[in-house]
Amino acid sequence: MTREAVFAYAKEQFGTEPEHLWANDPGAAVLRHAGSRKWYALVMEVRRERLGLPGVGCVWVMDVKCDPALVGALRTHAGFLPAYHMNKDRWVSLLLDGAVGCAEGLQLLDMSYALAAPKLKKASRKANTDKQATEGTGNEKSNCDR
C-alpha cells in the first residue's frame, strides 16, 4: 500500500482530501473526519532508526486510530509498530512499504474513520434510547408475520 493509494481511497470513500499542515514537512499529511474535524489518519515519512527499524533512510508510515484491544494484537504482526507521535494505546503505525496488505490497511483506515466520527450528545443518546423503548427496534415481528 502506498500513500497515494491511501489518499485516493480516502477521497473516494469519505470525500477527504489530505491536509498538509507542516511547512517543514510538506509530504506529511493528516486525514480529518468531516463531521468531527478529528484526525483519523496521519501519513508521514520517518527515519527508520526512530522507529527501531534496521537500515538507514526513511520509510512512509500511516498512523490510524484503533480499538485499544486491537492495538497490541496488530503490533505482533510484521509491518505494524507502536504509533509514532500519537497515543500508543489507541493508535498504531502501519508501514507503507508493502509489509501490510492493501486490503488490511484500508480496513483499518475504515475503522479509524468510524472511531473519529462525532459522538452523540447525552440528550440525543437518551432520546434514541427512549424512542427504541417506546417504539421497539423495528426488528420485532407482528402477529401477522408469524
Image (cartoon, helix red, strand yellow):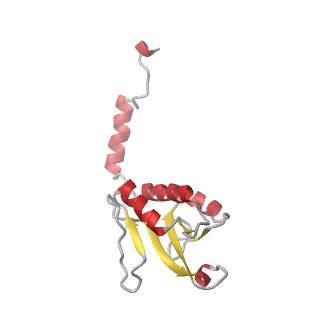
Residue 55 position within the rendered picture, expressed as x and y whole percent measured from the top left:
65, 83
Residue ID at (32%, 47%) = 124
Q: Which of 134 and 32 is in front in this view?
A: 32
- In this rendering, would 134 be left or right of 91? left
Q: Which of 87 and 108 is in front in this view?
A: 108
Residue 81 position within the rendered picture, expressed as x and y whole percent measured from the top left:
60, 70
Residue 118, visible in the rendered structure: no
Quadrant housing residue 19: bottom left
Residue ID at (35%, 37%) = 130
Residue 126 position within the rendered picture, expressed as x and y whole percent measured from the top left:
35, 44
- In this rendering, would 117 be left or right of 76? left
Residue 65 position within the rendered picture, expressed as x and y whole percent measured from the top left:
49, 63
Residue ID at (35%, 29%) = 135
- In this rendering, would 16 be left or right of 146? left
Decide: is 30 above or below 8. below
State the count of labels. Answer: 0
Residue ID at (52%, 58%) = 108
Decide: is 71 above or below 54. above
Residue 143, visible in the rendered structure: yes
